[in-house]
Image (cartoon, rainbow, N blue to C red):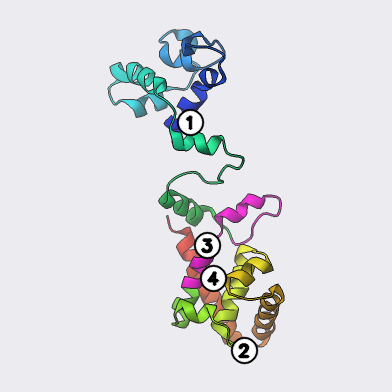
Amino acid sequence: YLLQVMRYIHRNPLRAGWVEDLEAYPWSSHRGYLSTLRKWNWLYKEFILSMLHKEEGKRLETYHRFVCEEDDVGLLKIYEGKKWPSILGSKGFVQRIKKRFFVPRQHPEVPESKVLAPAAADILKVVCAVYGIKRDELLRSQRGRFNEPRNVAIYLTREIRHDTLNEVGRLFRMNRYSSASSAIGRVKAQMEGDRQMQKRIQKIIDNLFMNQTQT
C-alpha cells in the first residue's frame, strides 16, 4: 500500500494535466527519487526503493518502471470517492488493527474511533459462547419473559459500540427503538442487585477484549 500511495502522489501532476512528462514537474520528489546527486540526500527514499528491489543497483530502474505504470484501479476508486474508509486494507488487516487499537471508551471528539469497535457479530458470538446458546436465540423475542442472554447482548451492543437505539433495534428485530431502550434498562436494574449477572457480563467483556487486543 505504501508503494501504491507513493506512485499515486508522484503521478498527480500527470493526472491533473500539468505536464506530459513527470520529470518535467519541478515541485515533486519524483526527480529526487531518480537522482543520485548529493543535493537530494535530505530525501528519505531508501526504504521505499528497497521495497522495489533487493539489489541496490536495480532499484532506480525498477522505481521508474513502477511509477510509469497506471495507478491501481481499486485505489483510485477509493481516493475519488466522497468518503474514504477509516482503515484501508484487506479484511484481515482491518481486523488486526481493530484488535490492536480499540479501547472500550471511545473518544467523544473522534467519531471515527467507533470504526475500531468490535463488530456487533463478534459481541453476539461471545455472548452465545458464555451462555451456551445459538445466535437465533438472541435474535428471537420472547414476550413476557426476561431473556437474559438477549437482553445482555442488546445492552453490550449499545454500551460497547454506542450504536443508536434504532440500529440496535434493527439488529435484534425490534419494531420500536423504545423496546431496545427498555431491554437496556432492565439489564442495568438487574445488575444492581445480582452479582452473578455482573460476573457473567464482565466475563463477556473480558473475553471480547482479550480477543480484541491479541495481535
Mark 3: secondary structure: loop
Residue located 48% across and 13% down the image: 22
Rendered-image quadrant of the N terminus: top left
Which residue is denoted by mark 2 in the rendering? Answer: 143
Label ID, residue 205: 4
Give the residue at the far front of this rendering.
175
N-term mark: 1 or 2? 1
Which residue is denoted by mark 1 in the rendering? Answer: 5
Mark 1: secondary structure: helix
Which residue is denoted by mark 3 in the rendering? Answer: 119
In space, the residues marked 3 and 4 are separated at their CA atoms by 13 Å
Density class for disc 3 (Cα within 10 Å; few <14, some 14-19, many ≥20) is some
Q: Pick whichever, 43 or 96, lies toward us.
A: 96
Observer-side mark, 3 or 2, equals 2
Discs 3, 2 touching: Cβ within 8 Å: no
N-term mark: 1 or 4? 1
Q: Amino acid at mark 1?
A: Val
Density class for disc 2 (Cα within 10 Å; few <14, some 14-19, many ≥20) is few
In space, the residues marked 3 and 2 are separated at their CA atoms by 27 Å
Observer-side mark, 3 or 4, equals 3
Residue located 35% across and 17% down the image: 60
Q: Pick whichever, 20 or 1, lies toward us.
A: 20
Q: Amino acid at mark 2?
A: Arg
In space, the residues marked 1 and 4 are separated at their CA atoms by 37 Å
**In this picture, residue 53 sits left or right of residue 205:** left
N-term mark: 4 or 2? 2
Look at the image and say whether residue 208 sits in the magenta stretch.
no
The residue range painted magenta reads 104-125
Look at the image and say whether residue 110 sits in the magenta stretch.
yes
Q: Amino acid at mark 4?
A: Ile
